[in-house]
Amino acid sequence: MGYLETVPELAPLYAGADYVEEKTIEGSADLRRFIAGMMRRPTWLGALFTLRKILVRPFGIRQERVEGDGLRPEDVPFAPGEKCRGFTVTCGREGEHLAMHIDDPHLKAQVIVAAVPLPLGGNRFHVATIVHYNNRLGPIYFSIILPFHHLVVESMMRKGAKA
């Protein structure tokens, strides 16, 4: 069980999950700066999304185009239903955590980002991915993107930690 599963507001997001992972990284940023840093897209990620667009076409998935190069910390949304670079906010608490989701025809992916203050300053950031399959093609689709998912999330976390 990861840290985020112990947060009462977030625990229901894990119910019935088909896939769960939680990664951590430490940095001096606050939660808003970390999330804004995570959302900066490196050039190689644009190429990866182009490849994804080709790979997921047989699954009937349309890739939403995300405009702009990034997100300013002051523009990180915390209210349910607000949009955050292709994600929709599920719930959030300023300075503590933000949960966002993307719904594809075959799965729902929830991403949670939380900041836990460290005793000597800075934060330990927890980033969780929770996947619920919507149908029998969900596991097939997810197995195709999973290796790329690890690369993308780790890269995003490093960018957030440097923010």
Image (cartoon, rainbow, N blue to C red):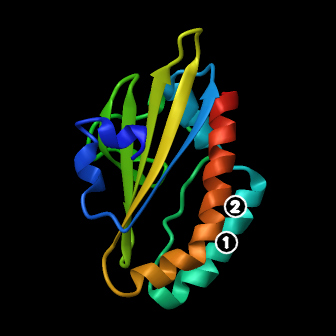
Place of residue 158 in the rendered image (x, y in percent of width and height, measured from the top left): 69, 39
The residue tagged 2 is 46
Place of residue 138 in the rendered image (x, y in percent of width and height, measured from the top left): 41, 80
The residue tagged 1 is 50
In this picture, residue 102 sits left or right of residue 42: left
- Kindly check if marks 2 and 1 are in contact, taking CB atoms under 8 A apart as contact: yes
Residue 23 appears in the picture as rendered: yes
Which residue of the protein is positioned furthest toward the bottom in this rendering?
58
**What is the C-alpha distance between the residues marked 2 and 1?**
6 Å
Q: Residues within 10 Å of mark 2 (few under 14, many from 20)?
A: few
Which residue does the image show at 50% across and 43% down from the upper left?
127
Place of residue 31 in the rendered image (x, y in percent of width and height, measured from the top left): 49, 26
Which residue does the image show at 59% across and 8% down from the upper left?
120
Q: Amino acid at mark 1?
A: Thr
Local secondary structure at mark 2: helix
Local secondary structure at mark 1: helix
Q: Which mark is residue 40?
A: none
* 60 vs 26: above or below: below
Which residue of the protein is positioned furthest toward the top in this rendering?
120
Q: Residues within 10 Å of mark 1 (few under 14, many from 20)?
A: few
Residue 70 appears in the picture as rendered: no
Which residue does the image show at 29% across and 35% down from the upper left?
7
Q: Amino acid at mark 2?
A: Gly
Q: Quarter-wise, where is residue 71 in the image?
A: top right
Q: Quarter-wise, where is residue 96 in the image?
A: top left
Which residue does the image show at 26% across and 45% down from the upper left?
11
